[in-house]
Amino acid sequence: MSFIHLKSKVKTILSNDAESTEQRLKEVCELLQSSVGYYDWVGFYFAKEAEKTLHLKAFAGEPTDHVVIPFGKGICGQVAVSNKNFIVSDVTAQDNYIACSITVKSEIVIPLFKNGKNIGQIDIDSHLEDPFSEEDERFLEWVNEEVAVIL
Ligand code: SME
């Protein structure tokens, strides 16, 4: 499915006020994971500023042990601090990386901003090496902007 088609589906999910925010986020994760061949795990982490930790709020794919990640640790923790997109084409080349599964070869993490503040992120793992492009970055930035509206 093209990103254009996915955008309209994401909008439909997020506009469903009858469902909780968590449920809508879960459905977005499921949509992306099942529609984009190289998105094997999709999740949203949100920051607890006081604790300086990220907490997994919704995901699709294999359950992970890493439901709480300290700021600075792993790809996710680094994005919590840098406020910048992070594409890892080959996870074995990263020193500061938290492995969830040996099948994961690459990862993309895009920060989620609300009123200009980095409050969380979308994290996607792929079983392919180097599948992510600028098109994914622009699409996922858009997803995060839409999610920020309902938070
Ligand atoms: N690999 C991530 C940890 C989260 S899992 O991908 C679900 C990281 O290094 O931050």
Image: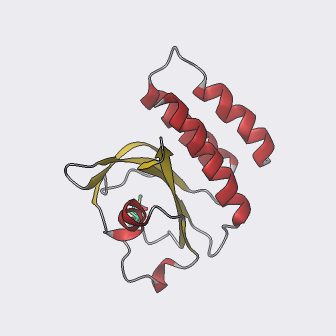
Residue 40: image x %, image y %? Answer: 57, 57
Q: Identify the residue shown where x is 57% and y is 67%.
A: 127
Q: Identify the residue shown where x is 44% and y is 52%.
A: 62
List the single residue furthest toward the left: 51
Q: Identify the residue shown where x is 60% and y is 48%.
A: 33
Q: Is residue 114 visible?
A: yes
Q: In this view, does 64 lie above or below 10?
A: below
List the single residue furthest toward the top: 18
Asked whether, in this view, residue 106 is left or right of residue 38, the answer is left
Q: In this view, does 80 lie above or below 48?
A: below
Color scheme of the displayed model: secondary structure
Residue 15: image x %, image y %? Answer: 61, 23
Q: In which quarter of the image is ligand 1?
A: bottom left
Q: Can residue 60 be seen in this view?
A: no
Residue 34: image x %, image y %? Answer: 64, 45
Asked whether, in this view, residue 47 is left or right of residue 34, the answer is left
Q: Identify the residue shown where x is 37% and y is 64%.
A: 81
Question: Where, quadrant-wise, is the C terminus in this rendering?
Answer: top left
Total numbered labels placed on residues in the image? 0
| Res 10 quadrant in image | top right
Q: Nearer the viewer, residue 20 or 34?
A: 20
Residue 24: image x %, image y %? Answer: 51, 29
| Res 30 quadrant in image | top right
Q: Nearer the viewer, residue 59 or 47?
A: 47
Q: Nearer the viewer, residue 71 or 29?
A: 71
Q: Nearer the viewer, residue 92 or 51?
A: 51
